[in-house]
Image (cartoon, helix red, strand yellow):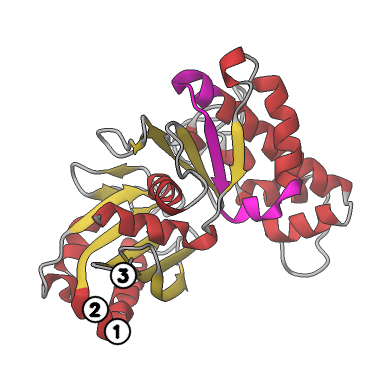
Amino acid sequence: MPPTSLYAALDIGGTKIAGALVDDNGRIHHRIQLPTPAQEPAGAVFAVVRKVLDELAGEPQWAGVTGVGIGSAGPVDLAQGTVSPVNIPGWRGFPLVAEVTAHAAVATNSLPVRLAGDGVAMAAAEHWRGAARGAANALCLVVSTGVGAGLVLDGAVRPGPSGNAGHLGHITVDLDGEPCPCGSRGCLEGIASGTAIARRALAEGWQPAGEDRSARAVAEAAAAGNEIALAAFDRAAKALAAGIAAAATLVDLDRVVIGGGVATAGRLLFTPLTRHLDVYAALPYVRELDVRQAELGTDAGLIGAAALCR
């Protein structure tokens, strides 16, 4: 089916800010990605958003864009159009929708701007074009710098009134756990995110071969049989299993889709996750959870942001 509309999509996280032009069939026609200056002031972070928008607006296809969709690390506030990403401390109550709407490339064509949390955007993408297709009730997780999630209930993505439904990264899975930047403690994100996996491995004595101290490097060490690296992934998988089982028990899910950079570790994450789910997903109606790796990879946030405009 030929595309009938074109959307500008933004995917904003603690590590990268990506943008793309996406058509009504979910195909990406142009993509740009820049690092997030996450520890810089609010204006410096938005300057990167402006740069991404300006590059997209320089494409000949921009004239056909009918809306701008934004998937952002959260929490978000749909009523106010603001975002307060836990991993971008300079953005607290940042008026992202208003700032994007006022940007010249958007304002000139009076383009509508739609916002969602990154987990909701990922859920929209995977339900539209990915591993959650056909699922009536699904939890879609992004496990990366942070942990985000979105819910599909009764066949539709359900962001909730504030836009934060399914924000699984900030449920408590360790009652005596470390304080979290969100203000709580023992949060799932503090154990299962890529950042947490790398931090745990380093604290337990893992020595990276080079300068790379990321979760990707931990995954490489785990694949080579490093016991500390394997234990860091096992701990993350256990926390994810507890969080997933709690969500499934609460809202009666039939499918779980996991994406983000940590999910690319494949069996290093999914094998212990399956084992731990056998313990935590104990009630009969959650025993048969269908757990799948996301299909859309790093493009899920962009495709989901475009889906918001549909």
- The residues tagged by marks 3 and 2 sit, at their Cα atoms, a distance apart of 17 Å
Q: Circle 3: is it few (<14), some (14-19), or many (20+) Cα within 10 Å?
A: few
- Of all residues, the one furthest to the front in this rendering is 1
| Residue 139, image x, y percentages | 48, 36
Q: Residue at x 31, y 48 (%)?
A: 116
Against 266, residue 30 (above or below) is below
Image quarter in which the C terminus is found: bottom left
Tell me if I can see residue 149 in this picture. Answer: yes
Where does label 2 land, which residue?
62
Q: Secondary structure at mark 2?
A: helix
Local SS, label 3:
loop
Q: Mark 1 vs mark 3: give the one in front.
A: 3
Residue 202 or 281: which is nearer the viewer? 281
Mark 1 or mark 3, which has the lower sequence index? 3
| Residue 238 picture location, percent across and down | 69, 32
Q: Quadrant of residue 77?
A: top left
How far apart are the two marked residues, 2 and 1, measured between alpha carbons? 6 Å
Q: Quadrant of the N terminus?
A: bottom left
Residue 233 as seen in the image, left or right of residue 301: right
Q: Which residues are magenta?
A: 246-267
Amino acid under disc 2: Trp
Residue tagged by mark 1?
A: 59
Question: Position of 247 compared to 192: left or right?
Answer: left
Residue 2 is marked as 3
- Three-letter amino acid code at the position of disc 3: Pro
Residue at point 20% right, 58% down? 113
x, y percent for residue 228: 84, 46
Neighbours of disc 1 within 10 Å: few (<14), some (14-19), many (20+): few
